[in-house]
Image (cartoon, coloured by chain):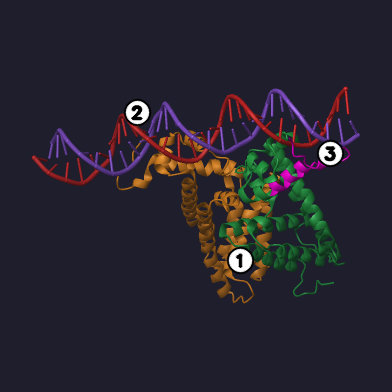
Chain colours: A orange, B green, C red, D purple
Amino acid sequence: MYIVMPRPTRQSPERGSARIRLLESARDIIREKGFAATSVDDLCKAAEVTKGAFFHNFGSKDALGVAVAEFWSETTSAFFADAPYHTPDDPLARVLAYVAFRKAIITGELKEFTCLAGTMVQEVFETAPDIRDACGRSIFGHTATLENDIEMARRERGITADWTAKSLAHHTQAVLQGGFVVAKAGNDPALARESLDHLERYIRHLFNVTEDDAHD
Amino acid sequence: MYIVMPRPTRQSPERGSARIRLLESARDIIREKGFAATSVDDLCKAAEVTKGAFFHNFGSKDALGVAVAEFWSETTSAFFADAPYHTPDDPLARVLAYVAFRKAIITGELKEFTCLAGTMVQEVFETAPDIRDACGRSIFGHTATLENDIEMARRERGITADWTAKSLAHHTQAVLQGGFVVAKAGNDPALARESLDHLERYIRHLFNVTEDDAHD
DNA sequence: ATATACATACCATACGGTCGGTATGCGTCA
DNA sequence: TGACGCATACCGACCGTATGGTATGTATAT
């Protein structure tokens, strides 16, 4: 006697419910405990599936690591694409709105707002190149979207200083990731927000904006 | 037939060679593979001691985690205390020299220059509060030394902006930690140095220093 | 003599992974 | 239209090994 889960259609073979439940569980548990400390049994229990389902959907634990990094990349891409910070016509205003938005979504517990890719890559960068690269694609795919706005702002405002849009986008990501690490060390989310205030001040300086004149 | 290792004297019971060898091995291996993925056997093998020595010196794997964070704190404290960036009389010059020094020591492989405390706290912040707090003490103990120079520079230069020396010291640490994460994700140490260039530019701005006039 | 600093054998459990089996979706062809 | 067959999706028992940890024995320093 089997309890039957909703099945995917042949048209969307990736949409098996077990697969998605496992990815969602992995996203949450790995952010909480890290990748190595998360066992396959942990994931199966949380997703309410069996090991058979796990190894049917993912060939190995490492393969799940890659898949969950890609899952993270896709879901966060959609989340940021839908976010309200894109509305200003002024590209610099969009950049500053991005920073404000990142600050605004730092709420609740650490495990709820920290970055899966940053957490995973920290432990596996040397031992699991596939996972490392998947985390890299997630992180740098995201910075690339910000880089566009930075570059537009740079041109529009005629900034000719010795920094590139790419390096500032990377720096923004570094401040975010570092803010998470420091917040974890101090067990205080406010530490992450604090660094974003410094980042905002820095960006305003780079574009010679003193007050709120970047608003649309 | 026992192969006898050099023994500690009763006057310095902490100086057992097995203990230090284990701490040094732990420092290196955990930075490479993370805490959870590092087994007690791994450490014993690398330190060339037996499990008996391990559990004699440390009551548990978690206790080693705390001890190695404290070991890290002590050794890095001594390293930075001896570093050449303290020589300028001008406190701001010392702050900028600190950033330059941190950039200069980012050489070789990632596992050689990244931060043990940051790596560990990222995975254990939720599951091992003792280790988390030990990592926090290491990180914030270090930022406190920088905070002194920042505060002196602030007063000496009459800066009255709406940021504190403590928050800037925390931000500096966040940029470092985040630079490490981004460098791991991109598998490229240059990414960490890149963020320190932005940090240097930011600090110069905060103190209204345009060129090299912070030199002593 | 006693405490320290190990060495070694051992243990219960947890781990990632395998394997044979079963239920369901779906194209095919009579 | 419906019986058939195959692919997909999943179940759950099992396996070999690795894991953190323990118990006991022994050499050395004081």
Marks 1 and 3: which is nearer the front? 3
Which is nearer the eye, B112 or D27?
A: D27
Check disc 1: other Cα within 10 Å, few if <14, some if 14-19, many if 20+: many
- Amino acid at pointer 1: Leu
Q: Which residue is mark 2?
A: A2
Report helix, strand or loop for mark 1.
helix
Position of residue A38 relative to residue A81, above or below, is above
Quarter of the picture holding the C terminus of chain B = bottom right
Instruction: Please give the label number shown on residue B13.
Output: 3
At x 42%, y 40%, the residue is: A55
Report helix, strand or loop for mark 3.
helix
Which is nearer the eye, A99 or B131?
A: B131
Please report, as a chain letter, where disc 2 is located: A
- State how far apart marks 2 and 3 are (Cα): 62 Å
- State how far apart marks 1 and 3 are (Cα): 50 Å
Asked whether, in this view, residue B120 is left or right of residue A150, the answer is: right
Q: Which residues are magenta?
A: B1-27
Mark positioned earlier in the residue sequence (2 or 1)? 2
In this rendering, do the residues under marks 2 and 1 share a single chain?
yes
Q: Which residue is mark 1?
A: A168
In this rendering, do the residues under marks 2 and 3 share a single chain?
no
Which is nearer the eye, B177 or D17?
A: D17
Instruction: Please give the label number shown on residue B38.
Output: none
Report helix, strand or loop for mark 2.
loop
Task: Provide residue A123's location: percent of width, then percent of height.
Answer: 60, 49
